[in-house]
Image (cartoon, rainbow, N blue to C red):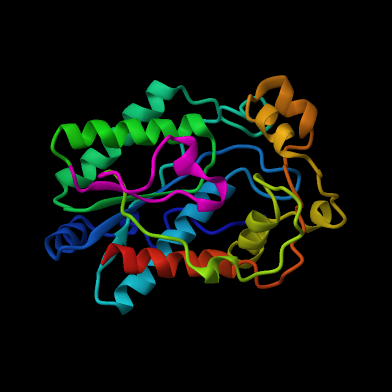
Amino acid sequence: MAGEDMFADTLAELTASQVQEAARSGAAALLPVGVIECHGPHLPTGTDAYTALKLCQLTRRYAAELGRRCVIAPPYYWGINGILNEFPGSFRIRAETAAALLSDVIGSLFANAFQDVLIVSHHGDRLHNEMIRDVLTELHVQGHTRARWLYAPFRWRMFERLGMSGEEPIWVPWAPTPALDDFKVTGILGVHADEYETAAMVRFFPDTVDYDALRGLPPTRLTLEDLQDWRKGGEDAKRLTPDGYFGAPNPIDPELWRHYDETARVMARAIL
């Protein structure tokens, strides 16, 4: 199952001179952030990184239409798996390793003269997002106040889980619009490898999806109380989601992928 090259449309495909020109032109650097972890039997382990990359590609397109140039950094996909780290296909990255690497990647973008570095992270693990928060907070203390967080999915209530509002200096503030919820969904509680993520991967990276495994895959039908236990990881996660997904894997709305397209439109306006 061949997927899109993770370097596609990123700085990795540019020459040093082209990178220099982009930075000098005032382009913002979008940094896709994800992890490599189990996403059920139907989605690739790189789902979060792929989705973050696509969000950056879409945001760049809509920002360009509004007159703001952006470039995309090579994806950072060595985030933290605190929940599914013991599942097949998941990588176990220590928090200090992830933080040091992310800090160095952002520092490298500033060293290459990019003035704005904007993180787009599609991964809901609290430990991972606390790491990003702490890295950005420390960078702001050091004076790098234009390293900011553009995207953490609203549907995972990340602001609330981090004890933040989204108005703090480390964020590029934006508010969800009605268009983000203008889709049919199953109504089944889902947070991982569910209908949203399946819709995105089927639309944008169809060759990475195992359609035989997806066909007829039943929803988990777990509760909010189960979600709290699942987030503990380890044996709780294995007990509640033995197949590595939480929610309804099969979307009922063929347009659900547009949730991500609409998100990118909102983010493009926020960058301005």
- Residue 112 appears left or right of 256: left
Q: Which residue is drawn at the image coordinates 42% and 70% (left, top)?
A: 265
Q: Residue at x 66, y 30 (%)?
A: 228
Say if residue 98 shows up in the picture.
yes
Depth check, front residue: 159 or 68: 159
In the visual, does 217 lie left or right of 228? right
Q: Quadrant of the C terminus?
A: bottom left
Q: Position of residue 244 (x, y in %)?
A: 73, 37
Look at the picture and state if 174 lies above or below 102. below
Residue range corresponding to the magenta coloring: 145-169
User: What residue sits 20% from the left and 55% below the top?
Assistant: 16
Residue 205, x across and y down, in percent: 60, 61
Residue 135 found in image quarter = top left
Count of numbered marks: 0
Q: Is residue 149 magenta?
A: yes
Q: Is residue 256 magenta?
A: no
Q: Split into 4 quadrants, where in the image is the N terminus?
A: bottom right
Q: Can residue 58 be seen by looking at this rendering?
A: no
* Residue 126, percent from left and from top: 51, 33
Residue at point 47% right, 53% down?
Answer: 52
Residue 255, picture quadrant:
bottom right
Residue that protrudes farthest toward the bottom in the picture: 65
| Residue 239 vertical placement versus 149 (above, below) | above
Apparent side of residue 187 relative to residue 36 in the rendered image (left or right): right
Above or below residue 95? Residue 156 is below
Q: Nearer the viewer, residue 107 or 126?
A: 126
